[in-house]
Amino acid sequence: MNETTCPFCRIAAGTLPADLVATEASWIAFRDLHPQAPVHVLIVPRRHLVSAVELENDPALAGTLLAAVARVARREGLAERGYRIVSNVGHEGGQTVPHLHFHLLGGRPLHWPPG
């Protein structure tokens, strides 16, 4: 998958519609099409990276993305109640779209283990 076929790259470029929550120069946040909680937002870097493994080479982007998660959580009313951040890596980790993304889940009690 590359930037022209990746659905998250297409959303970031504005060529594929999404329910946008927030956007910044280096990232975009939008609602998940198949929510697993009342609030389920994906935070995605605009630059195509396959997974969180690639953040090892870009710690500044890692910090930017975690700050974005916190900002979106506050906007969604989750900061005081609590929320979960998930980033699946690879097939066995449950990653279905090979573009780095963080799931922000909240709005109900979340149990452990997740599955």
Image (tube, grey):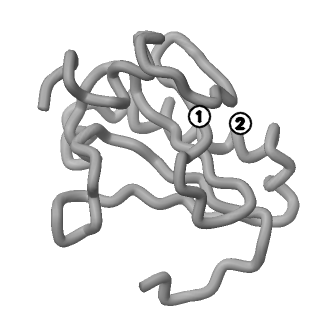
Amino acid at pointer 1: Phe
SS class, disc 2: helix
Q: Which mark is residue 2?
A: none
Q: Is residue 8 left or right of residue 39?
A: left
User: Dividing the picture into quarters, in which one does residue 87 lie?
Assistant: bottom left
For label 2, count other residues whose C-alpha is less than 10 Å away and answer few (under 14), some (14-19) or many (20+).
Answer: some
Where residue 69 sits in the image (x, y, percent)?
60, 42
Where residue 93 sits in the image (x, y, percent)?
25, 68
Mark 2 to mark 1 CA distance (whole Å): 13 Å
Q: Residue at x 28, y 66 (%)?
A: 94
Q: Which residue is mark 2?
A: 71
User: Dividing the picture into quarters, in which one does residue 51 lie?
Assistant: top left
- Answer above or below: position of 35 versus 77: below
Q: Residue at x 50, y 30 (%)?
A: 64
Quarter of the figure that contains the N terminus? top left
Front disc: 2 or 1: 1
Where residue 47 sits in the image (x, y, percent)?
31, 20
The foreground one among 71 and 104 is 104
Q: Is residue 20 left or right of residue 3?
A: right
For label 1, count other residues whose C-alpha is less than 10 Å away and answer few (under 14), some (14-19) or many (20+).
Answer: many
Q: Which residue is mark 1?
A: 30
Q: Decide: marks 2, 1 in contact (CB < 8 A)?
A: no
Q: Residue at x 62, y 86 (%)?
A: 111
Quarter of the figure that contains the C terminus? bottom left
Q: Earlier in the sequence, mark 2 or mark 1?
A: 1
Where residue 8 sits in the image (x, y, percent)?
37, 30
The foreground one among 68 and 56 is 68
Amino acid at pointer 2: Arg
Q: Residue at x 51, y 52 (%)?
A: 103
SS class, disc 1: strand
